[in-house]
Image (cartoon, helix red, strand yellow):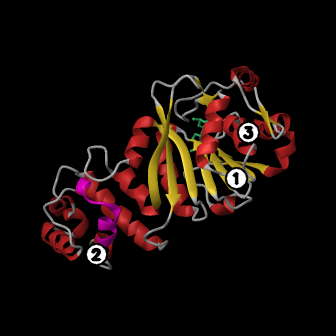
Amino acid sequence: MSDIAGVRLLGPGQIRGLAAELGVRPTKQLGQNFVHDANTVRRIVATSGVGPDDVVLEVGPGLGSLTLALLETAGRVVAVEIDPVLAARLPRTIAEFAPGRAADFDVVTADAMTVLPADLPVTPTALVANLPYNVAVPVILHLMTHFPTLRTVLVMVQAEVADRLAAGPGGRIYGVPSVKARYFGDVKRAGAIGRNVFWPEPKIESGLVRIDRRDPFGTDEAQRAATFAVIDAAFAQRRKTMRSALAGWAGGAPRAEELLREAGIDPGIRGERLDVADFVRLAQAAGTDPVATR
Ligand code: SAM
């Protein structure tokens, strides 16, 4: 156990103790794998680059491992936890392990898939989280969409999902998460995490992903929704050419071809070759077209 700024981090003994006290049986459904390694949580915080000016949104604080590491460095932490038993214990854990920082911590019992800024007592500037793996991508996209104040994201996810998020056009793993994440800014892999830092140990490897928000296409919600709809349509049948993959979306293959040409895209290309700017232009070409934008 180490001690920075009067904060003690959780090791295997504390994790076991807290879990036993609460009668926690980690569930796969909620992606409950708790980190019991101080070096790992410190590394996540260091990679996120958050500092005293940041208000960090942590999704799924669990027993508080990463929360405490965040409180060593960040100005404030607001945690969103779906499990009411874990959420209820957190303030006491923070008071015990980071007594000097208890006033800078809030926990909200909520689902990160639907939480909105009005549900939080503070406005977050960064998302740092060890995400529940089965909902990692929808949680990231929901939060980037509804919390425009989030400038940086550093999340731990399943390694395969980290690869997908960070993939560029042309490859086999490039898909919906890769394109949509890029709508908000720069996305990159930020490290690998082994299995033995978790309790219980997961069967899969983990990876870190960093997103720096730049909003290269602005923040208009209608444009984002229209762009995401065309991305979904293009990758729903990723082996098809754009002309036929987008037939349903456009109201027929000839109309799809027209819109593609208007956007300067070869109708014979597959979606996996296009970057996010191509999809934005395509959504804009469709404009108020009654079928393509319905
Ligand atoms: N941050 C802790 C750590 O690193 O040890 C726990 C991480 S664990 C992988 C994921 C956490 O997310 C669990 O505490 C789980 O209860 C919580 N969780 C699962 N689904 C959630 C959701 N939809 N919204 C908020 N929290 C969720």
Say which residue appears at 65% left-offset and 27% top-offset: 37
Task: Specify which label sits upstream in the sequence, 1 or 2.
Answer: 1
Q: Label 3 belongs to which residue?
A: 68
As helix, strand or loop, the secondary structure at mark 3 comes to helix
Q: Residue furthest right?
A: 100
Gap between marks 2 and 3 measured at Cα: 48 Å
Q: Could you tell me which quadrant the N terminus lies in? A: top right
Residue 290 appearing in the image: no
Task: Say if the magenta span includes residue 276.
Answer: yes
Q: Main secondary structure of the magenta part?
A: helix
**Residue 274 horizontal side relative to residue 213, left or right:** left
Residue 231, picture quadrant: bottom left
Q: Position of residue 177 (x, y in %)?
A: 39, 51
As helix, strand or loop, the secondary structure at mark 1 comes to loop
Q: Label 1 belongs to which residue?
A: 51
Task: Specify which label sits upstream in the sequence, 1 or 3.
Answer: 1
